[in-house]
Image (cartoon, grey):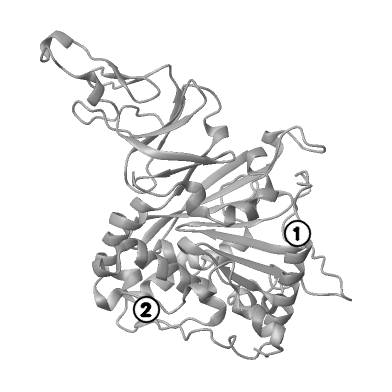
Amino acid sequence: MDKEYIAKLRLLMEYEAAREQPPEGFPKLPDLPAGRYTDPRFFELEKKYLWKKSWLFAAHIDELPEPGCFITWENTGEPVVIVHDRDGAINAFYNTCRHRGAPVVTEESGRRPSLACKYHGWTYDLTGELISIRDQADFAPDFDFSCRGLIRLRCERFGNLVFLNFDPDAPTLMDWLGPVVDELTEFQFENCRLVGKQRFDLECNWKIAMEANTEVYHVPNIHPTTVAPILDDRRNVNTFYANGHGRMIAPGHQRNGDNERPRTINRSPFPRIDTVSEIGRTCTQSYGLFPNWVSPLSDQTIPPLLFWPTSIRTCRFEVWTMYHGEGSAGALPLDQLPNIWTTPDGAELGQVLQEDTQFGEAIQKSMESTGFEGVPLSYQEARIYHWNQWADRIIGEDNIPEELRVAQVMGDEWLMPNDPRMALIDEGVPG
């Protein structure tokens, strides 16, 4: 971020701290329908459209370090194999043999010169092309190998991160991310190394778990001794992007004009990323990448949180830790670095995430009761409404039962790079 944009953010922080109501012109947010968390119809629409048309973070290149390395991936219920090709490309395919539908690989990860189905021995190269079949003479003489390759998925990289998309007509990953790409450049995703990831199963709809990490309205209640003392929730600045992405930036509590904040987590084992701006060094700068990535970014770590549905009322929570480049000054070996989100042994979530997830199961039960009619959202929680608007656009409003839709009340005037709050500041209009 350049100095001009940082100055703009500091003005917005003071505007947010001083306002006594939502900004002039900000729309009243209608309640989110209750069924978006509990109705099987909406869950099926998410499966059919949301997860099939969005770019999904699937892997880090460190999980596929050499040609022939592969991992299997089933986070949306579809069997996928992701492979490092001989020319350095990363390919993704349905993990489904084109003969009788058996999985081409059954291990979670490994390394092979080719992919051979264990059922009948059909073999594919690392680009997915069918290269041999057993007893070829027993098939038609004109059997066409060229149309029997593994079915490919869209697979693109952002730095060392691998994303996939089930929609062959989807925009490129860079177009999907839009201006977020430029903002993330300072964190050097091309140099980040994977420390580790852990998975935890939660007893609630995946959106319940994710939404706890997309607003600061809950901070004083849920994090009174962990986050609240070091994050100024009243100066939090939310930003909205096309395609449902969002960002929050919250400074530390000011002390004698000093914006520096103490670290919430001991990140001392990690070297600093020297290209990160003042905002990343002094504030909680967190991005939500549609549909299910939430990550605070700092000048030391890149720690994404991923939320995957396993049923309408359960989800899988992935916690990742990445850092800036082995070989950096002061860096410890990978096997000596901690996952910042968990206990040292990786068996349990750390305190902050335990606080965030503690009510998930109870909330799910309450939402399934007849006493739950919908969700009234505050201005502070507008990123949740913004996400739901884009979910409906991707699903297709006409595909959604009327009682489950959200009204499209937040217009493009609130999308980055637009920000009506700046005009209010210039005019001296209070919040």
In the displayed structure, 257 sits above or below 195; it is below
From where the camera sits, is residue 341 visible?
no
Q: Give the percent coordinates (x, y) of residue 252.
A: 76, 70
Residue with the mark numbered 2: 407
> Nearest the camera: 202 or 420?
420
* N-terminal-most mark, 2 or 1: 1
Could you tell me which quadrant the N terminus lies in?
bottom right
Q: Residue at coordinates 32% horizontally, 47% vertically from top-left? A: 77
What amino acid is found at the position of numbered circle 2 in the picture?
Ala
Q: Quadrant of the C terminus?
A: bottom right
Relative to 211, residue 407 above or below = below
Where residue 362 sits in the image (x, y, percent)? Answer: 43, 72
Q: Depth check: 275 or 414 in front?
A: 414
Which element carries disc 2, helix, strand or loop? loop
Residue linked to disc 1: 2
Q: Amino acid at mark 1?
A: Asp
Give the class, few, some or many, for how many residues have Cα within 10 Å of label 2's Cα (few <14, many ≥20): some
Residue under the point 45% across and 67% down: 387
Crowding at dot 1, Cα within 10 Å, few <14 / some 14-19 / many 20+, comes out as: few
Residue 338 % position (x, y): 67, 44
